[in-house]
């Protein structure tokens, strides 16, 4: 026999019930009385993880909405700064060319650069995590390869050399 469908998940007041359970707005008995549902159904609903999954999904949706709003705000700032830059570079008003305002243009350029940097960070296009680059000279790699090849007939000595070299490499800055 297939599993029964959760009565609470199908209930017309599911959102309110889930909220009351999650916020501990009363005991399960109180919630049961409030929505006239069996307490056993409430227990199964809660223990099955339905409430937790729903809360997690709601939090994820909220995060996505907030991220979208943040991106919209950043893009709006970018558009405004670009408009200021455009007008500061000199425009034509009523057929008359207005001279550029270089101070305002430079300030607008700095603002646009900062906004683009922020946008790149938010979207993940700019990675500021530290990176470690390990450089080995070609000469060292050649010498190491030759020594290991010469030691091929002597496996015990080769293992000892590899272990000693590994210790030296770890100690180097």
Image (spheres, rainbow, N blue to C red):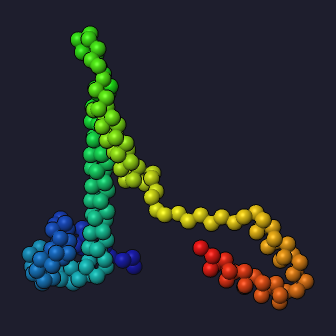
- Tell me the quadrant of the picture where the N terminus can be found: bottom left
Query: Which of the 4 image quadrants contains residue 140?
Result: bottom right
Relative vertical location of residue 63 with respect to residue 100 in this rendering, above or below: below
User: Seen in the image, is 2 located left or right of residue 97?
Assistant: right
Residue 171: percent from the left, percent from the top? Answer: 62, 80
Q: Residue furthest bottom?
A: 156
Q: Residue at x 17, y 70 (%)?
A: 19
Image coordinates for residue 113, horizontal then vertical, percent: 37, 42
Q: Is residue 55 above or below residue 150?
A: above
Instruction: Between residue 23 and residue 75, name the one nearer to us.
Output: 75
Quarter assignment of residue 88: top left
Query: Which of 173 and 69 lies nearest the eye of the viewer?
Result: 173
Image height check: is 151 above or below 125?
below
Say which quadrant the C terminus sits in: bottom right
- Residue 4 in the image, given as x and y percentages of width and height: 32, 76
Residue 147 in sight in this render? yes
Q: Nearer the viewer, residue 56 or 137?
A: 137
- Is there any visible trace of residue 36 in the rendered image? no
Q: Residue at x 29, y 59 (%)?
A: 63
**Residue at point 72%, 80% (across, down):** 165
Q: Position of residue 77 (x, y in %)?
A: 27, 41
């Amino acid at each position: 026999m297939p599993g029964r469908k959760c009565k609470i998940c199908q209930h017309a007041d599911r959102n309110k019930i889930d909220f009351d359970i999650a916020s501990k707005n009363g005991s399960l008995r109180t919630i049961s009385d409030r929505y006239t549902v069996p307490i056993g159904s409430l227990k199964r609903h809660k223990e099955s993880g339905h409430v937790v999954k729903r809360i997690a999904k709601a939090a994820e949706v909220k995060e996505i909405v907030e991220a979208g709003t943040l991106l919209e705000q950043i893009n709006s700032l970018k558009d405004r700064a670009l408009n200021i830059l455009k007008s500061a570079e000199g425009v034509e008003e009523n057929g008359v060319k207005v001279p550029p305002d270089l101070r305002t243009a430079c300030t607008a350029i700095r603002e646009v650069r900062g906004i683009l940097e922020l946008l790149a960070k938010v979207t993940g296009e700019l990675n500021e995590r530290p990176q470690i680059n390990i450089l080995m000279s070609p000469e060292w790699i050649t010498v190491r390869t030759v020594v290991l090849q010469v030691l091929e007939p002597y496996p015990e000595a080769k293992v000892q050399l590899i272990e000693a070299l590994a210790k030296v490499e770890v100690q180097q800055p």
